[in-house]
Image: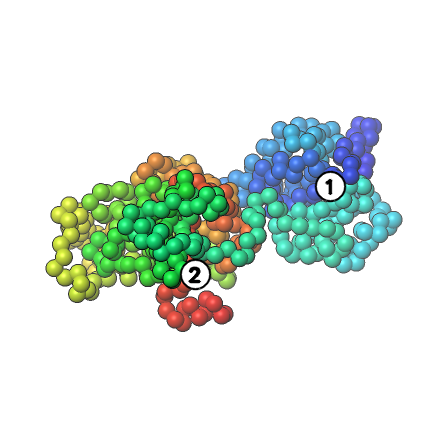
């Protein structure tokens, strides 16, 4: 390929060796990860000029992650390609590869001699579409240079169209986690009945070196004897596993007691209640208890005698299922309420207007400090109601927590630049976020706070992430084995028999 600039013939300086490839980047790859330019090792990187046009239309989105990433890409390209000569000739990147901006000569010249362009015009005749023009540019690079050419895009439909015209295409793989379809929710470690008895009495047990080396810190296990006896445990490192530290129950202020219903929920509650763990990732299908357990454990620690956290913050990405209904009126809380309705439902269950008393808890006394804190919280909210803050409407118990700031609703679009201190932060539907977005949220968490990322990697509505590249699984994969991080997978549905059958069969 040649370009004329002031009478000088300019040609991209692409590397040509047996192992080098030329990757043509689609716009969505740069928007997904602006640093992707530096992550293709010592290969050639080509950016179609049409990508610059698309970035130009997106850069004006002031309040979106796409707009910020488009502006970041522009700044990176401006530094790497400061003039027209470097843009057309290309530059060498720090990782050993090359970067060039490609202008498809076949679109402005006679392309009858190009079999690839003739095939493209037959299969994809509408070259006014940016996607088709980007595919055409990749075909031009494929015909012009000898290294194998691969179009990299996160749009599945563009991948399919590229393959239809004879062009190799693939997803952006840098932030995809390895495939692990057989990952179990926990491991079963065989022990003798005597070792299990000693573990039950002493509370900890040293594993064999070979087994311990295969475990990650804070990994949850089930110790199993040959007689069928079992005990749950958590690996703390240095070869030792210890018993779970669970209270008899947990509850929200003036709410009903909640207990774990299965072994996986015991693991989840143990991590939620452990102040040494600052980050939790939880996978689980619908009805496994992710929302309910994370909410009740958060409120339990906010309102207990230790006062570990000053409040609970709840958020989730705003990605609709099906057709969008448009803008929502009202305050931030009112706008977010439809998206966070699962948490209002959970709070309604945890703090009903008339909580039932269970016989086994009648007559049992809570600690004076905890009881005093709950009474003060309720008195403050009742005072707000008496002074007309609810406009005469009957206030629900959980609404008191929201009105006095104990529970906050966070919008992710406003979280950049914040520092969240002494809060229990719950990020729901985290599988809808990109790895960069999850990083942005987690880096807002200050000392003394805790963040819980929950979601189902099988339920993704964001078209630019999948089960291996979304922020939830990426975070789990990168943070695995860190002393302040834990991961739990919930598989057993507890909502109802109907809900579990639907989650498994439909």
Label 2: element kind: loop
Q: How many marks?
A: 2
Nearer the viewer's eye, disc 1 or disc 2?
2
Residue ID at (50%, 62%): 322
Q: Position of residue 490 (x, y in %)?
A: 42, 58
Can residue 311 be seen here?
Answer: yes
Residue ID at (34%, 41%): 276
Image quarter in which the N terminus is found = top right
User: In front: 131, or 397?
Assistant: 397
Give the residue pinned by disc 2.
491
N-term-proximal mark, 1 vs 2: 1
Indicate the quadrant where residue 43 lies. Answer: top right
Q: Is residue 30 left or right of residue 204?
A: right
Indicate the quadrant where residue 105 lies. Answer: top right
Residue ID at (23%, 43%): 307
Residue ID at (80%, 55%): 119
User: In front: 14, or 272?
Assistant: 272
| Circles 1, 2 touching at the beta carbon (< 8 Å) | no
Q: Position of residue 406 (x, y in %)?
A: 26, 47
- The disc label shown at residue 358, or none: none
Q: Position of residue 360 (x, y in %)?
A: 18, 63
The crowding category of the residue bearing disc 1, from other C-alpha atoms within 10 Å (few below 14, some 14 to 19, many at least 20), is many
Mark pair 1, 2: CA separation? 42 Å
Q: Is residue 464 left or right of residue 367?
A: right
Q: Position of residue 350 (x, y in %)?
A: 27, 59
30, above or below 163, in the image:
above
Give the residue pinned by disc 1.
21
User: In front: 303, or 197?
Assistant: 197
Q: Is residue 182 left or right of residue 79?
A: left
Label 1: element kind: loop
């Amino acid at each position: 390929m040649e370009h004329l600039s002031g009478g000088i013939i300019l040609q991209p300086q692409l590397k040509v060796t047996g192992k080098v490839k030329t990757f043509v980047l689609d716009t969505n790859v740069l928007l997904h990860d602006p640093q992707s330019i530096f992550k293709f090792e010592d290969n050639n990187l080509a950016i179609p000029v049409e990508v610059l046009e698309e970035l130009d239309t997106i850069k004006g989105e002031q309040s979106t992650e796409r707009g910020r990433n488009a502006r970041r890409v522009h700044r990176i390209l401006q530094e790497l390609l400061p003039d027209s000569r470097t843009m057309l000739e290309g530059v060498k990147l720090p990782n050993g590869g090359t970067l060039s901006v490609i202008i498809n000569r076949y679109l402005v010249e006679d392309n009858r001699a190009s079999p690839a362009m003739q095939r493209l015009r037959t299969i994809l005749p509408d070259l006014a579409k940016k996607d088709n023009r980007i595919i055409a540019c990749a075909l031009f690079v494929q015909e012009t240079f000898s290294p194998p050419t691969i179009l990299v895009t996160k749009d599945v439909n563009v991948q399919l169209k590229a393959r239809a015209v004879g062009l190799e295409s693939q997803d952006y793989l840098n932030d995809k986690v390895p495939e692990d379809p057989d990952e179990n929710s926990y491991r079963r470690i065989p022990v003798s009945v005597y070792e299990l008895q000693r573990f039950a009495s002493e509370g900890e047990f040293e594993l064999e070196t070979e087994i311990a080396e295969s475990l990650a810190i804070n990994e949850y296990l089930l110790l199993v004897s040959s007689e069928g006896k079992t005990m749950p445990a958590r690996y703390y490192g240095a070869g030792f596993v210890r018993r779970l530290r669970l209270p008899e129950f947990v509850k929200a202020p003036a709410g009903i007691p909640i207990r774990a219903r299965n072994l996986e929920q015991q693991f989840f509650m143990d991590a939620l209640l452990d102040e040494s763990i600052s980050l939790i990732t939880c996978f689980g299908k619908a009805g496994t208890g992710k929302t309910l357990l994370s909410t009740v454990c958060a409120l339990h620690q906010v309102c207990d005698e230790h006062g570990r956290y000053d409040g609970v913050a709840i958020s989730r990405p705003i990605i609709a299922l099906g057709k969008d209904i448009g803008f929502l009126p009202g305050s931030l809380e009112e706008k977010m309420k439809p998206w966070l309705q699962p948490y209002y439902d959970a709070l309604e269950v945890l703090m009903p207007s008339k909580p039932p008393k269970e016989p086994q808890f009648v007559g049992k006394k809570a600690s004076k400090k905890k009881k005093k804190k709950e009474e003060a919280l309720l008195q403050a909210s009742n005072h707000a109601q008496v002074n007309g803050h609810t406009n005469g409407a009957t206030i629900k118990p959980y609404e008191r927590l929201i009105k006095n700031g104990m529970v906050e609703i966070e919008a992710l679009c406003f979280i950049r630049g914040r520092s969240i201190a002494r809060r229990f932060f719950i990020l729901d539907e985290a599988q809808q976020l990109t790895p960069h977005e999850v990083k942005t949220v987690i880096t807002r968490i200050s000392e003394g706070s805790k963040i819980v990322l929950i979601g189902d990697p099988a339920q993704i509505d964001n078209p630019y992430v999948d089960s291996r590249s979304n922020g939830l699984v990426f975070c789990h994969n990168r943070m695995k084995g860190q002393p302040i991080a834990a991961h739990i997978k919930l598989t057993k549905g507890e909502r109802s028999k109907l809900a579990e059958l639907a989650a498994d069969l439909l």
